[in-house]
Image (cartoon, helix red, strand yellow):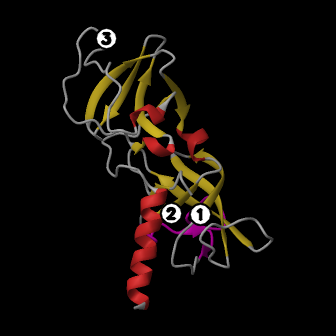
């Protein structure tokens, strides 16, 4: 019974916290985000996707999945590969390239601004937490079953992407700062691979 409850809790947390596709071919420069994501809660989508930067050839794919996709919770975010004054070059379905007009229907946000002050968990605990932003420093163990890491800051150092994080030693599901936190550094991405699951809804 206890095992079943643990699995159920994990499932409910994942359903409420994720909304993230898993393996994009490129992480790009940030996100293009719908200014009104709630209009797509019924399964509809923005209609003006294009195959070219001149925005004169409509994209004809029948399935559209943004990287963060839970419009009833405000998530309708595409990975942005390139931006100009006229267009955004984006990823659809983790691998298809399309273009959007750079207008008021969408806005741009960098990875750093998206990650800072968010919560994530490591894809693998072999991706250790360290006392400093280098792999030669001391490893910090998180004994909690659920790996809820709160992000304080993001840096890029010698081509490595580090997040300064904290977690609650009380293993709270929704941790708050109460003077019982442990701080450390963890890699959150390589050049084009995410090492974490970002929990924007937690």
Identify the image quadrant of the C terminus: bottom right
Q: Which residues are magenta?
A: 124-140
Identify residue for label 3.
Answer: 55
Residue 77 is at least partly visible in this image? yes
Identify residue for label 2.
Answer: 121
Q: Is-magenta flag for residue 129?
A: yes
The mark that comes first in sequence, 3 or 1, is 3
Q: Main secondary structure of the magenta part?
A: loop
Q: Vertically, is 190 above or below 33?
A: below
Q: Nearer the viewer, residue 17 or 111?
A: 17
Q: Is residue 177 left or right of residue 25?
A: right
Rounded to the nearest angstrom, the CA distance separating label 1 from label 2 is 6 Å
Q: Is-magenta flag for residue 197?
A: no
Rounded to the nearest angstrom, the CA distance separating label 3 from label 1 is 40 Å
Identify residue for label 1.
Answer: 149
Q: Residue at x 30, y 34 (%)?
A: 92
How packed mark 2 is, by other alpha carbons closer than 10 Å (few <14, some 14-19, many 20 or more), is some
């Amino acid at each position: 019974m206890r095992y079943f409850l643990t699995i159920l809790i994990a499932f409910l947390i994942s359903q409420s916290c994720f909304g993230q596709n898993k393996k994009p071919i490129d992480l790009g420069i940030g996100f293009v985000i719908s200014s009104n994501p709630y209009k797509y809660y019924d399964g509809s989508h923005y209609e003006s996707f294009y195959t070219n930067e001149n925005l004169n050839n409509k994209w004809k794919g029948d399935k559209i999945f943004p990287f963060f996709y839970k419009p009833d919770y405000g998530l309708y975010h595409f990975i942005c590969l390139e931006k100009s004054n006229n267009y955004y070059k984006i990823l659809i379905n983790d691998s298809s390239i399309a273009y959007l007009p750079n207008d008021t229907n969408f806005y741009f946000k960098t990875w750093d601004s998206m990650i800072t002050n968010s919560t994530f968990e490591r894809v693998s605990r072999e991706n250790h937490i360290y006392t400093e932003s280098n792999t030669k420093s001391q490893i910090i163990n998180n004994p909690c079953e659920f790996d809820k890491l709160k992000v304080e800051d993001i840096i890029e150092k010698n081509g490595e992407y580090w997040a300064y994080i904290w977690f609650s030693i009380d293993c709270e599901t929704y941790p708050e700062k109460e003077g019982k936190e442990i701080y450390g550094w963890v890699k959150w991405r390589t050049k084009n691979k995410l090492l974490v699951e970002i929990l924007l809804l937690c």
